Amino acid sequence: MEALAMHISNGIINGPVAAVFAVIALAAMAYCVMRGRQDLDDRLAPMAGLVAAFIFAVQMLNFPIFSAGVSGHLLGGALAAMLVGPWVGALCVAVVLVVQALVFGDGGVAMLGLNITNMAVIGIAVAYLLIALLLRVLPRTPAGLAATAFVSALVSVVVAAMGFVLQYQLGGTTDLGGNLAGLAGTMAVSHLFIGIGEGLITATTVVTVAKVRPDLVYALRALKPAAPVTVPTVGGVR
């Protein structure tokens, strides 16, 4: 490879499809801004900054997957969803993607809508839906919280990668000769391994924060147990 760009680079997806996803991403971010205002307070605002910085750092771990313009990397969506919630979390990821594209040339500026849709919208949405489900059925112990973080991170990474496969089917600029299934398989398998690594990092980080300051874990505050539990909880937060 002569050059390697994180995310989707300019020219990988055609203009019309990129424009459609730009509109989708813009609408989603506008909604997140509206909903996120209700969550932001003196506790969440600094945490959002830390989460954005952490996501920027982990996304620098980059693995080539498809052509010279697409690569796999850690996403950080599940971590953001657990610590600062889906709305602020999506904004954190989107800000990181914009900075990477404009300042570092990681991912095409014209492809921002595609990248934001995959990582800030699809990734966060899948992660938080799983978090909401698992935290209602698993005990809120360190083990239960770790399992929630691991599963949500793993699944969200793979699903976000499949978002790119859908986008490529709609407007990929290179003819794969009918081998879209091969691309999907490559993306799924590679991101499965990436998701395992991200799951371990997410679980370790969230459990560590929960043990010290459970009030800083958005998911523990916002998602109430479906029924009273009798097992010890993380940091006493139910």
Image: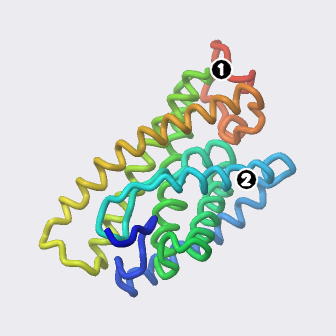
Residue placed under numbered mark 1 in the picture: 228
Quadrant containing the N terminus in the rendered view? bottom left
Q: Residue at x 42, y 43 (%)?
A: 195
Mark 1 packing: few (<14 Cα in 10 Å), some, or many (20+)? few
Q: Check the image and tell me how it is coloured.
A: rainbow
Tell which circle, 1 or 2, labels the residue nearer the N-terminal end. Answer: 2
Q: Residue at x 55, y 50 (%)?
A: 58
Q: Is residue 75 above or below residue 198?
A: below
Q: Is residue 111 above or below residue 77?
A: below
Query: Does residue 125 appear anywhere in the picture?
Result: no
Element class at badge 2: helix
Q: At which x and y percent is residue 121?
A: 52, 61
Indicate left or right for 15 with 233 as reference. left
Indicate left or right for 85 with 191 as reference. right
Residue sitting at the far right: 42
Q: At which x and y percent is residue 179?
A: 15, 66
Q: At which x and y percent is residue 44?
A: 78, 49
Q: Quadrant of residue 183?
A: bottom left
Q: Which amino acid does the dot numbered 1 rest on?
A: Pro
Residue placed under numbered mark 2 in the picture: 48
